[in-house]
Image: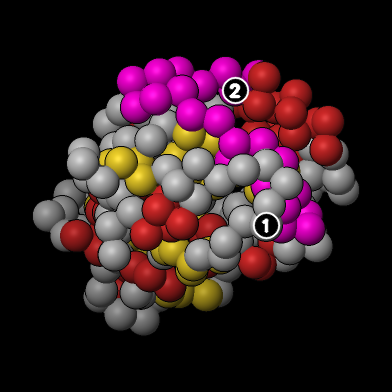
C-alpha cells in the first residue's frame, strides 16, 4: 500500500486506514511493518462506530470487515466492496478505480531535518520514535538516546532543558510528544483540505 | 454495506499521529479511499 501512495496522490485520492484498534496499537503495528505514513484511524471509542455507519462493523466478532469504500470529492460513495475479514484486497485494482474518478494531484511528502532526543523506558520517547519510523524520517531525523550517550545528554541540556523526548529543528525545541509527533506529521505528511 | 451513489455519513476519528481526521475535511478537495481491516497485526 505504502509503495503505491504516489499513484493514489496522482489520482487526487487521500488514503485512510481504519480498524477498532487504538492509536497506540496502530503506531506500533505500522512501525513493525516498516512505517505507514497515511493516517490509520482508531475507530475505537465507541468501538466500530464509523464502520457501523457504513455497514462494515461485524458486531458478533467485535471487528470491522476487510472492506474498501471510495468516496469522491462531493462526498458520494463511488465504490464499496468487502473481501471478508480473511480476504486480500487488490490494491492495484483500487488504484485504477481511483484513477477513473481522478482529480487534482495531491502534494507528495515534505521533508524535515533535525534531532530527536529520547530516553530509555519512556512512553512519550517511544511514541515520538515510532512517528519518525512511520513517517520514514530515519535519514533526516537523528535519534539520540540520552541514557546511553553522555554527549547527547550534554547537547540536550544545551538546548535549554534536560528533558526528553525533545525534538530540535533549527532553533526550535519541542518537548511534548504530542507536539513533536504533530510537528513531524504536519511537515512531512500534511492532510489535504 | 453502504450503496454506491449515496452520500457517505461523516465521522471524526483520531489517527496514529494524534490528528483529528474527519471525512468532511476532504470535501471539495480530494477523493478518499477508506481501507477498513479487522485488526492491527493482520494484513492491510
Query: In this rendering, which labeled residue sits more in front, label 1 or label 2?
Result: 1
Residue at image x 57%, y 18%? A90
Callout 1–callout 2 Cβ contact below 8 Å: no
- Magenta stretch in the rendered image: A69-92
- How many numbered badges does the structure rendering display? 2
Q: Is residue A51 left or right of residue A107?
A: left
Q: Chain of mark 2?
A: A
* 10 Å crowding of disc 2: few (<14), some (14-19), many (20+): few
Q: Is residue A49 left or right of residue A193?
A: left
Q: Chain of mark 1?
A: B
Residue A58, by quadrant, is top left
Residue found at the very far bottom of the displayed protein: A160
Is residue A182 or residue B5 the one in the foreground?
B5
Q: A149 or A193, which is in the foreground? A: A193
Examine the structure image and report whether residue A150 is included in the region drawn in magenta: no
Q: Is residue A98 above or below residue B15?
A: above
Decide: is A180 above or below B36. Answer: below
Local SS, label 2: helix
Residue A171 visible in the shown view: yes
Q: Residues within 10 Å of mark 1 (few under 14, many from 20)?
A: some
Helix, strand or loop at label 1? It is loop
Please tell me which residue is depicted at 49% across the width and 67% down the height of the picture: B12
Q: Residue at x 27, y 31 (%)?
A: B41
Distance from Cα at disc 1 to Cα at disc 2: 23 Å
Residue A41 pos. (x, y %): 43, 53
Give the percent coordinates (x, y) of residue A70. Answer: 65, 41
On-image quarter of the C terminus of chain B: top left
Q: Which residue is mark 2?
A: A91
Q: Which residue carries the number 1 mark?
A: B7
Q: Quadrant of residue A128?
A: bottom left
Amino acid at each position: 500500500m505504502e509503495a503505491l501512495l504516489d499513484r493514489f496522490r496522482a489520482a487526487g485520492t487521500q488514503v485512510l486506514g481504519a480498524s477498532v484498534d487504538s492509536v497506540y496499537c496502530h503506531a506500533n503495528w505500522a512501525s513493525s511493518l516498516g512505517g505507514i505514513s497515511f493516517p490509520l484511524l482508531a475507530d475505537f471509542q465507541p468501538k466500530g462506530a464509523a464502520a457501523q455507519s457504513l455497514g462494515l462493523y461485524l458486531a458478533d466478532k467485535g471487528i470491522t470487515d476487510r472492506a474498501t469504500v471510495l468516496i469522491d470529492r462531493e462526498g458520494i460513495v463511488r465504490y464499496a466492496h468487502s473481501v471478508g475479514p480473511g480476504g486480500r484486497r487488490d490494491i492495484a485494482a483500487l488504484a485504477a478505480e481511483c484513477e477513473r474518478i481522478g482529480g487534482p494531484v495531491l502534494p507528495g511528502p515534505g521533508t524535515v531535518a533535525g534531532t530527536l532526543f529520547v530516553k530509555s523506558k519512556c512512553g512519550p520517547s517511544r511514541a515520538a520514535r515510532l512517528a519518525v519510523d512511520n513517517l520514514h524520517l530515519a535519514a533526516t531525523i537523528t535519534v539520540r538516546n540520552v541514557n546511553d550517550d553522555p554527549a547527547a545528554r550534554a547537547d540536550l541540556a544545551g538546548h535549554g532543558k534536560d528533558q526528553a523526548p525533545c525534538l530540535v529543528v533549527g532553533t526550535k525545541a519541542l518537548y511534548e510528544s504530542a507536539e513533536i509527533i504533530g510537528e513531524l506529521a504536519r511537515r512531512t505528511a500534511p492532510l489535504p483540505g | 454495506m453502504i450503496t454506491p451513489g449515496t452520500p457517505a455519513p461523516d465521522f471524526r476519528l483520531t489517527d496514529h499521529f494524534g490528528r483529528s481526521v474527519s471525512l468532511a475535511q476532504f470535501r471539495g478537495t480530494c477523493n478518499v479511499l477508506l481501507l477498513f481491516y479487522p485488526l492491527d497485526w493482520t494484513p492491510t
